[in-house]
Amino acid sequence: MSQLSTVIRQYAAYDRWAHQAIVDRLKEEPEATLDRHAMSSFPTLRGTLMHIRDAENAWFLRLTGATMRWPAEPGQALDTLMPYVERFTGYAMALDEEGLLATCRYRDLKGDPYAQPAWQMIMHCINHGSHHRGQVVTQMRALGLERVPRTDLVAFQRLPGG
């Protein structure tokens, strides 16, 4: 396995782990907590999480050359996030070096054309998720939630097998 494949696989596994930690913790809260105002890029936890879901879907569709769909689906249940994360990370982890280096041609949400290697698109999507997970953590604290999960990359790397 190449160094690039090793890095992408670890980064994708981290993305899955960190999103799951947030979802698992928020499942302990009343559903209404997801819709309480806690300003960030999006005004609620649900809004932020659905943006993450929709972006993971969009980058998967771009990587695979499928037709763009935004939002990923009309529903906004917390349980809708992880299937999209698992599909994206599973795809990223399965790519070999040739697939990671392959150029993907796609259009952004405005219709502007781009071409990038798959590995750059994967890194962007995971970084995007990390950025918004940080906002989720801030929103959780602003709402007075306790036991906010630690989702730093180093926390994942320190786990057995991380």
Image (cartoon, rainbow, N blue to C red):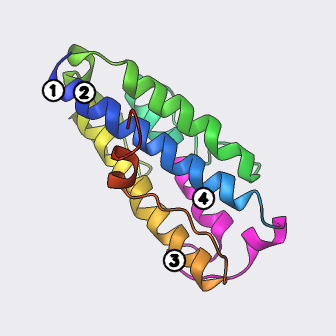
State the extent of the magenta-drawn residues as a range: 30-55
Q: Which mark is residue 6?
A: 2
Q: Earlier in the sequence, mark 4 or mark 2?
A: 2
Magenta: main secondary structure equals: helix
Image position, residue 31 (x, y; %): 83, 64
CA distance separating discs 1 and 3: 34 Å
Between the residue at mark 3 and the residue at mark 2, the CA separation in whole angstroms equals: 31 Å
Foreground mark, 1 or 4? 1
Q: Earlier in the sequence, mark 1 or mark 3?
A: 1
Asked if the magenta segment contains residue 90, the reply would be: no
Determine the secondary structure under disc 1.
Answer: helix
Q: Would you name the residue on which mark 1 appears?
A: 3
The residue where tag 4 is placed is 49
Residue at mark 3: 138
Image position of 142 (left or right of 55):
right
- Looking at the rendered structure, the secondary structure element under dot 4 is helix
